[in-house]
Image (spheres, rainbow, N blue to C red):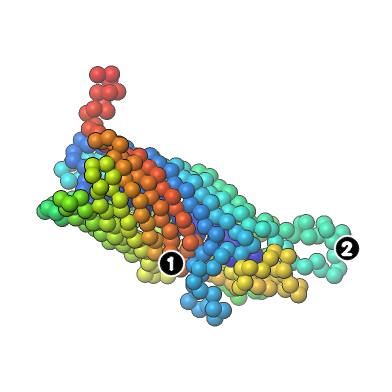
Amino acid sequence: MERGVRQNAARAALCAAAAAFSLADASEASPWVLRPGRIAASSGVYYQYANSEFFSEGANVRGLTGEIPFSLRGQFHSGTMFAGLRAGVAPRFEFELTVPFRLVSYTADPVILLPRPMDFMGLEADYYRRNIINLSRAAAGVADINLALRYQFLSISPLVMAAELRFKMPTGYAPPQGTFGDRPTSTADFLARAGELVRPANIRDDVTLGDGQLDVSASVLMGLGFRTGTFVRLDATFVARTEGAGQQIQGSLRVGQSIGRLFVFFAGVTGQYSVTQGKVIGISVAALDPTIPAEDYGRGNDPTFNLLLREVRLDRDLLDVSGGVIARLSPSTELNLSYARTVAGRNVSATNTIFLSVTANTDWSQVVNAARGR
């Protein structure tokens, strides 16, 4: 069984999305809000991949900590296209809308956990064929829509500060579950029914497009811009999460430097920490030794051999580092290219994210006139 069967792919997908949108915020969300009548349209793609995770359990007595490879040679990949719009609607006030379309896949070697019973009367090959657990999955669709309202309440050179209220809204995709669905929700229940539960027909999809619940985030955004071309961004956020997910605090720091009139190079760090513990949504499992090949699982007629039971929650901690460049293609158009890596965390994958976007700024009146053919 792969480490955190349900959690691996779902966790990779969710945290990759979080990392990518933290990069998007570097060029889209800003304490420097647009003036009234000004709009900024953006579009882009980002690609994520991971083959390891940061494993940490509070009650873990097996010594499984730090970055550990996915078992059964697991691989996570995801590609996302998104479109975004910022608009200045009043003095010092703007809104932002981002809509992503995602394709997520997780692949791993198939595995057989249940040995053939002695009283099975059919062909041995038929029995094992029916009990192969295939963990490879794919999903595609519109992921969480983000809507943000932003108000700049302070502007004293070189300091700018803004308050932001953001809504992350699911779009009806299948929400995360445990490896065996939303039942059982305790390890004791699983152990009592292991022979019944560990079957191919009872394995739930490993891939999801998001947490499947509403988040409401309140942030303070601070920016410093100097005549030398240096800028500093510091964000602090509290995330109120619904549907029993743990509440979070988030923070990010970014520093950049312009080189001439064409390029801005930047680097940053982003953190996320769950301050409360969410409810259990199911049971998953971890591989005690992720390097063991698929044929060695279920050793000694024990379907739980090499497996450590885990209670699945939507809580996670992470630390990302990132860097990139913004190229000014014209006075009103920018290209953003960046890379991020999750370097530490709990209940997250060690995700790599490559991000590319183009943003164009203009006045709304020019868009209206162009539509009218003037």
Which tag is nearer the camera, tag 1 or tag 2?
1
> Which mark is first along the chain, 2 or 1?
2
Q: What is the number of callouts on the image?
A: 2
Residue 192 higher or lower than 245, as above or below: below
State the residue lying farthest toward the top. 373
Packing grade of label 1 (10 A; few <14, some 14-19, many >=20) is many
Disc 2 residue crowd, few under 14, some 14–19, many 20+, Cα 10 Å: few
Q: Mark 1–mark 2 contact, CB under 8 Å?
A: no
Separation of disc 1 and disc 2 at Cα? 50 Å
In the rendered image, residue 189, in percent from the top left (x then y), is placed at 62, 72
- Going 74% across and 60% down the picture, which residue do you hit? 131
> For the residue marked with disc 1, what is the amino acid?
Ala
Q: Classify mark 1: helix, strand or loop.
A: strand
User: Measuring 34% from the left and 61% from the top, which residue is drawn there?
Assistant: 269
* Relative height, residue 107 to residue 121 (above, below): above
Residue 3: name its quadrant. bottom right
Residue drawn at point x = 37 percent, y = 69 percent:
275
- The amino acid beneath tag 2 is Met
Percent position (x, y) of residue 221?
A: 24, 56
- Residue 344 is labelled as 1
* Quadrant location, the C terminus: top left
Judging by the rendered image, the residue that carries numbered circle 2 is: 121
Question: Looking at this view, is 229 or 204 the one in front?
Answer: 229
